[in-house]
Image (cartoon, grey):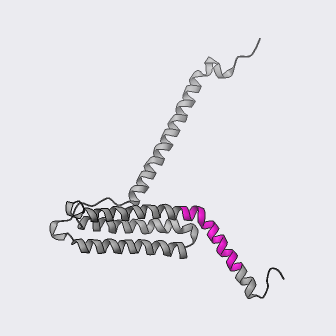
Amino acid sequence: MSDVDPTKDSRFRLFRAAAYGVYILIVAIFSLWIIVNVTGSVAAMTPEKLPPAEPDQVLSFRECLDATQALWTELETTRETLVRNAPARSVDQEWLRFRTAWLQRLRERESRCAIKSRERAELRTVFQRLEEVQDLYTIHAVQYAGEVGGAVEALQGAFDSARRNSAAGRLPSE
């Protein structure tokens, strides 16, 4: 007589149901925890759009254009500085700190520039493109820190080693 397959033994049906239930509950709680934390993190890093400013606080078209140009210059300068001077593996964290403050300034300018008005459609496009470039730079910073950064640091280490050996009068072929 063959043994009964324990996976089909009716005596363990209640236990199996309870184990599956506990497993599904733990996975659901863990997934919900991840979703809440990611959502909170993204919300903390992305300031909300502000309501339009009062009519007496609206900047002129030229002032708005100059303000967006200044934001663009700051964005580009910071990106270049981080890539050239910051430790490659920390570029993403440094960029995200900068990004949050920069986005807050962008939101303030948007609010004061009345970009929703028909007469300022071109200005609205400038703001949209500026934010799009910022998003791409964020992706670049994360990729640089995670993928390229290690190779860049290794290359810089090789340069330093070669310079030390050359300065000491030792050449690898000697």
Residue at x 23%, y 71% (from the top left corner): 61
| Residue 157 in view of the camera | yes
- Residue 1, horizontal then vertical, whole percent: 77, 11
Residue at x 55%, y 30% (from the top left corner): 20
Front one among 97 and 114: 114
Question: Quick check: 11 left or right of 44?
Answer: right
Residue at x 44%, y 75% (from the top left corner): 77
- Residue 150, horizontal then vertical, whole percent: 63, 66
Residue at x 25%, y 64% (from the top left corner): 111
Q: Which residues are magenta?
A: 143-161
Can residue 158 be found in the magenta stretch? yes
| Residue 117 in view of the camera | no
Quadrant location of residue 125? bottom left
Which residue, as the protein is rendered here, is positioned at the far top? Answer: 1
Question: Quick check: 134 left or right of 145?
Answer: left
Instruction: Determine whether 146 is above or below 156 in the image.
Output: above
Can residue 117 be found in the magenta stretch? no
**What is the magenta segment's predominant secondary structure?**
helix
Which residue, as the protein is rendered here, is positioned at the far left? Answer: 56
Quadrant location of residue 171? bottom right
Where's the C terminus, which quadrant? bottom right
Instruction: Determine whether 76 is above or below 128 in the image.
Output: below
Front one among 17 and 102: 102
Quadrant location of residue 144? bottom right
- Residue 89, horizontal then vertical, whole percent: 58, 67
- Residue 140, horizontal then vertical, whole percent: 50, 63
